[in-house]
Amino acid sequence: MNSAISLSLSSASPITVRSYDGAASSSSSSDLFFRNNSAPSQLRFCGLKREAFSGCKSSSNAVLLKQLRQNTKISASLSGNGTPSKGFDYDLVIIGAGVGGHGAALHAVEKGLKTAIIEGDVVGGTCVNRGCVPSKALLAVSGRMRELQNEHHMKSFGLQVAAAGYDRQGVADHAENLATKIRNNLTNSLKSLGVDILAGVGTVVGPQKVKYGKVGGSETVITAKDIIIATGSVPFVPKGVEVDGKTVITSDHALKLETVPEWIVIVGSGYIGLEFSDVYTALGSEVTFVEALDQLMPGFDPEIGKLAQRVLINPRKIDYHTGVFATKITPAKDGKPVTIELIDAKTKEPKDTLEVDAALIATGRAPFTQGLGLENVNVETQRGFIPVDERMRVIDSKGELVPHLYCIGDANGKMMLAHAASAQGISVVEQVSGKDHVLNHLSIPAACFTHPEISMVGLTEPQAREKAEKEGFEIGIAKTSFKANTKALAENEGEGIAKLIYRPDNGEILGVHIFGMHAADLIHEASNAIALGTRVQDIKYAVHAHPTLSEVIDELFKSAKVKNDVSCAVAEPIAV
Amino acid sequence: MAQLLNSSFTPTTSSLRRQCHSLTPRKSTQIQAKIREIFMPALSSTMTEGKIVSWIKSEGDKLSKGESVVVVESDKADMDVETFYDGYLAAIMVEEGGVAVVGSAIALLAETEDEIAQAVSKAKDQGSVSPAAPSQDLPVESKVPDSAPVAKAAASVALTASTHPASEGGKRVVASPYAKKLAKELNVDLSVVVGSGPMGRIVAKDVEAAVVANAVAVAEPAKAVTPALGVGSGSVVPFTTMQGAVSRNMVESLGVPTFRVGYTITTDALDALYKKIKPKGVTMTALLAKATALALAKHPVVNSSCRDGKSFTYNSNINVAVAVATDGGLITPVLQNADKVDIYSLSRKWKELVDKARAKQLQPHEYSTGTFTLSNLGMFGVDRFDAILPPGTGAIMAVGASEPTVVATKDGRIGMKTQMQVNVTADHRVIYGADLAQFLQTLAKIIEDPKDLTL
């Protein structure tokens, strides 16, 4: 099955090449691929795009693809780790077995590298154990609760449901079980590929040298041709906040769902805070957001944020204080409630004191980079983050690259998302196995799993406007609504919009933002388009099954107005 | 998608438009023409009415051409509607959540600040444009006229209860997010609502209760006032349904041979305990009910009754009914399984029952399943009284005020203790004097050493 697909791909590539050439020569706007043609050949973007463009330029594309496949086959038949380069214990040692480290390890094995991964805690890191994974379990519950509790919604389906209730422990167990399952899957996948999992805390002791071992126990020094730091992050707790793990908690505690407080303050209204507000309100809590910036959901496109507030905040049992800092948070004790002192973010004047049942600190995450032995290679962290260049190569205190040392994921702070870490890891492995690679972070999607979901890729409207002004181009905005989508209406989930930010002059997609049912799954059409460099005028001819939610995105691309409707898409239909 | 909606702002009426274009003296037309109506735009060909999702601008805000003013939900999408004129948003005529027919006015735009007032009065004249009220969970609210004296009356009643420790003596309102939202929606002034939530905070049901209380207060005055007048003027006022029921029960009680046993109980320890756990929402009523229930558990016969004149009916549950005076009546909400439920849940339950009783929303099982009744007039300073036994039960206890009393101790000293008198009325067919005496002894022990109450 797999081979059949790759075969058809490789036969498709020459056609692609031809059509690209044709378009380039016939097109009046020769700057269509300006950047890619004029850029130095080593400056490439994400993997798929590179292959597509190398195909444009060289006829050896098919050969290259074939080689890649052969490599895969060989390593697969070896069923695991390769043999290390001379003089080293390993080709690649990864410190930290989170999603980033795992993704890098898998790709390294595929590339035939002898790989080890050092983990001081449990395999899976934050995402699997204390982050995205268990929170999805809780959100799955909250989504269903929300639906079942919404009598109006049920009635409109003609359904009758008796009062929905929940068992807290059962919900908590679901999250715990999911984390355990995914953790085991991850561990097994590493083991079956033959990646050595070394237990203990990893420390860089010098160039290409790492020691590991339990704290206070015996330590082993190993050498590696290349080292990737992927130690991730921990919840960030601001000064003045006393976390007791019971009434003042971080996401680590909240995911265990030991209590469902009647009234909980969530400090920070980003992804984490928003997702937890969804969980808590579905389970019956009332929520107060404390946000330092003037607006809730500061990271989102303002228009999406506004709509999200209208749907996710205003009708729910949530209120908020914006433009305030929580300077002091004291846990509940001796019959006294949790107290939260608020000051004005600008004037620093005391503003209010909240007395509530619990507080969740969701003010972001801090890199976990202590004890890594960075001083041994002369690296200074910046606010805890390990400085890296665009290829994830670690930069030392003199601003020079540290050879053979890379840092991926939350520890470098470029984009604190599990899949970004994994993509960065794959990018590094590409480089150490001899192929230059630069990851296009603008093609990495992000999602917030509220009900409905929020997702985005690329620039927000203000960011795009700023860029447009600086570089002197126009931007266009297209919007479509879930209200006009058949599938969404069938589900009674018409609330939501999709928004496209693009360049009307050449059809480049700058950003896509979706708020609506299954937005997190819908974003990939856009993120793949950005990664591959597909233009609006090309993708709009792609066909979407009817009736599906994907048609929201289809409509979005179709409603964009590109001035020169130059196409460089697959011009000739392939007979089947 | 079309962002510019030409239909959104047009001059007020066609006649005005004509005037504008005609050569009538400027002065007279200028004034009127400067106040423009903002219409509900047609956002799609199939749209007949639109819902105001939110006003982006508020009354008095300055608008400049092209700015988004309002978000309108059509059958297809939510869209920002922009203004085509500079000016001031003078009056919003359809509030958020309201629905308006396409082409009807939803707000007025004044060209200068001076004309805002004029526009506002115009908006009032056009009050016939009735905004569809947003759907409400409590339809009662819409019927409640916003009359100040009523609100105050409710307030004076309400303020007698505990205030939140964080409220700085009532200066600050501590209300949960949903309570605040509801209060805003239902036009309830939170400063006069009593909190029954943890630490005395106002929670959603307090707001709902306040609305109901207001509604009852509004609905009742006629009833409440007439009898008062009637007494003076010698007229006859028929019983309400509840008063009729009370009357029947009282007469029925005459068929039961009752007797009374009294006891004096020292309450210093109980008072101390109450002080300690009051911030957690515990009420004295709940404490007394709990103590009574624990004593009843040890003396099941006091919890029994005589239904047919031939046998003891031992009740499987200890359900303590507590008499509550309501407007023009008396009702006995029941704390079920009071011996088993912990004191905090019991207190919450009690508050809920009282709220329901005031709102006349008690379900039959919530007032008719008592196996033992408590009647407390202590809060009025009554030191002792006796109660009539409600039919179907075995005993009722009348509780007097707990007051500092000079007592002589066995070692010949004189001291002061806080004491209260209780007086049990019981059906002698099943409960005998010794039973009551032992029961009261147990009760006194529990109240004088109340550590078991918080278990």
Image (cartoon, coloured by chain):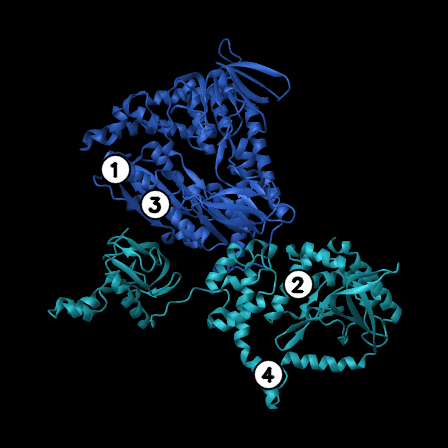
Q: Nearer the viewer, residue A555 or B179?
A: B179
Residue under circle 3? A499
Q: Earlier in the sequence, mark 3 or mark 1?
A: 1
Q: Chain of mark 1?
A: A
| Residue at mark 4: chain | B
Q: CA distance from mark 2 to mark 3?
A: 52 Å
Please state which of the two labelled residues, at mark 4 or mark 2, is closer to the viewer: 4
**In the picture, which chain is cyan?**
B
Where in the figure is residue A467, as x and y percent of width and height?
29, 36
Q: Is residue B341 visible?
A: no
Instruction: State whether residue A206 appears in this view.
Output: yes
Judging by colour alone, the chain drawn in blue in this rendered image is A
**Tag 4: residue type?**
Ala
Q: Quick check: marks 4 and 2 in contact, CB under 8 Å?
A: no
Residue at which label 2 appears: B350
Query: Which residue in the protein does label 4 denote?
Result: B228
On the image, numbered disc 1 is attached to which residue?
Answer: A469
> Residue type at mark 3?
Lys
Of all residues shown, which one is farthest toward the front? B413
Q: Disc 2 is attached to a residue of which chain?
A: B
The residues bearing labels 3 and 1 have C-alpha atoms spaced at a distance of 20 Å
Separation of residues labelled 3 and 4 (CA atoms): 67 Å
Secondary structure, mark 4, is helix
Which part of the image, by quadrant, shows the N terminus of chain A? top left
